[in-house]
Image (cartoon, rainbow, N blue to C red):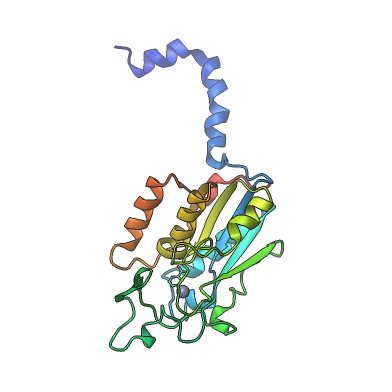
């Protein structure tokens, strides 16, 4: 068997020099193109510190998202946009508390504190987002009896938000998902994007999770199985 030194000697200095630039560039190797879109999921006051469904460290995604957004010519943002008394709120189910689950006609539903009520300050996008070139804001969860974690399909599994049609109409092939929360709206959006035929990347350090009843580990396992690529913001090259 050859040892490491013998292999290096066999390769020769010129081979090592030729390999080096590739290794250095690998840190930021993904270049978003015009067929790529960044989906910024639910960076809204209710999910940030002081909000009614605050995600731990949620505010830390904002500078990361602002930075990577500069590499994208297409940015779409989403807003969770519930009616007052929405079916996903624990407060409308007597005897139920937030983070408990119930069975609804479309399946199991986690119950949440009241959050992201249409037109309220809690439903507003973070004032610290700095993405003036974002081209579309899509609202979801606005049907009183149906939740919608996913930016593509409501929780009944069949009502479309129209996002897949929009992206296909704009000839988008790849979506990069960032925002809140990793294990709910980000994961469901990523999984539905795969089902709709997109190449999908989740930017891990541009997301934070809620993690209730093992939801975060399950979300990453489901995404891996579906072929979602898990990347870091440093993997994305600085400009489009
Ligand atoms: C979300 C729970 C309830 C999210 C929205 O944005 O991940 N999570 N509604
Ligand atoms: Zn919600």
Instruction: Point out residue 125 in the picture as x, y percentages from the top left corner.
Output: 59, 74
Residues 5 and 185: in front is 185
- Whether residue 43 appears in this view of the structure is yes
Give the residue at x 67% y 64%: 136
Q: Is residue 182 left or right of residue 42?
A: left
The answer, for residue 71, to whether it is visible in the render is no
Question: Percent position (x, y) of residue 117?
Answer: 52, 82
> What quarter of the picture does the N terminus occupy?
top left
Image coords of residue 127 (percent x, y)? 62, 75
Foreground: 158 or 136? 158
Residue 118, quarter of the rendered image: bottom right
Name the residue: 36% across, 19% down: 4
- Whether residue 110 is situated above or below residue 2 in the rendered picture: below
- x, y percent for residue 3: 32, 16
**As drawn, 33 above or below 124:** above
**Between residues 121 and 147, which one lies in front from this camera angle?**
147
């Amino acid at each position: 068997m050859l040892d490491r030194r013998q292999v290096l000697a066999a390769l020769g200095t010129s081979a090592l020099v030729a390999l080096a630039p590739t290794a250095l560039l690998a840190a930021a190797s993904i270049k978003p193109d015009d067929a790529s879109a960044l989906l910024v999921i639910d960076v809204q006051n209710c999910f940030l510190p002081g909000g009614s469904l605050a995600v731990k460290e949620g505010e830390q995604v904002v500078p990361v998202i602002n930075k990577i957004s500069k590499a994208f010519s297409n940015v779409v943002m989403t807003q969770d946009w519930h009616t007052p008394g929405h079916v996903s709120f624990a407060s409308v189910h007597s005897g139920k508390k937030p983070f408990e689950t119930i069975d609804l006609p479309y399946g199991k539903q986690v119950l949440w504190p009241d959050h992201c009520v249409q037109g309220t300050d809690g439903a507003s996008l973070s004032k610290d987002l700095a993405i003036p070139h974002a081209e579309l804001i899509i609202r979801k969860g606005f049907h009183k009896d149906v939740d919608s974690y996913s930016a593509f399909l409501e929780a009944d599994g069949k009502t479309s938000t129209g996002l897949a049609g929009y992206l296909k109409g704009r000839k988008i092939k790849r979506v990069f998902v960032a925002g809140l929360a990793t294990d709910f709206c980000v994961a469901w959006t990523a999984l539905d994007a795969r089902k709709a035929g997109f190449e999908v990347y989740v930017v891990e350090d541009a997301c934070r999770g809620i993690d209730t009843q093992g939801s975060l580990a399950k979300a990453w396992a489901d995404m891996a199985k579906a072929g979602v690529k898990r990347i870091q913001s440093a993997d994305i090259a600085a400009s489009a």
